[in-house]
Amino acid sequence: MQELQAKTRTLTGKVDDLQTEMEHLRTLNGQLNEVSLSSDNRARELAANVEKLTQERDAHQAEGARVAQEKDENLATVEKERDSHRAEAESLRQERDRHEADAARLTQEKELHLAEATKPAQERDEHRDEVTKLTQERDANPAR
């Protein structure tokens, strides 16, 4: 009987040890579940952050492409306007040159007309001077 009681005590000790070990395993399992859950939550959080960053990157790339296209369009418009302004400036230079040539021609014509207009007056004055001279000579020499 003592032997049976000793075996019972031994088995009871082993059962207690096994229960303690089971309790420890349950605690470890709970901690593992918490870590697993935390890890899963962190993985989902990281995946959401990656998705958000990917969307932001795509949006920035699209905005960059839009800005680049707008810049190209603006540059083309500016170049077109510049070419138009250059052509207009050249046209205005040519028109100015024509006006200057016309002004020079008109000035020459005016001077010619003035010269022609003063010619009869000069001739008249010269004729009058000649008549006056002849009259004075006649009056000085009545015998002639």
Image: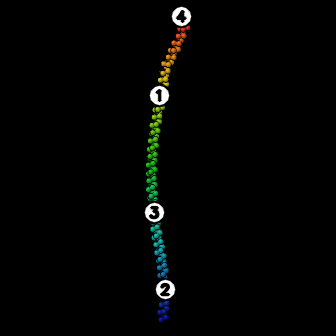
Q: Give the class, few, some or many, for how many residues have Cα within 10 Å of label 3's Cα (few <14, many ≥20).
A: few
**Which mark is drawn over residue 52?**
3
Real-space Cα distance between discs 4 and 3?
134 Å
Asked which secondary structure carries label 2, the reply is: helix
The one of 90 and 37 positioned closer to us in this rendering: 90
Query: Tag 1 or tag 2, which sits nearer the N-term?
Result: 2
Figure label count: 4
Q: Position of residue 95 (x, y in %)?
A: 45, 34
Real-space Cα distance between discs 2 and 4?
185 Å
Nearer the observer: mark 1 or 3; the answer is: 1
Real-space Cα distance between discs 2 and 1?
131 Å
The one of 55 and 16 positioned closer to us in this rendering: 55
Amino acid type indicated by mark 2: Asp
Q: Which residue is mark 1?
A: 106
Residue at (45%, 65%) from the top-left corner? 48
Q: Which residue is mark 2?
A: 16
Nearer the observer: mark 2 or 4; the answer is: 4
Q: Position of residue 111 (x, y in %)?
A: 49, 25
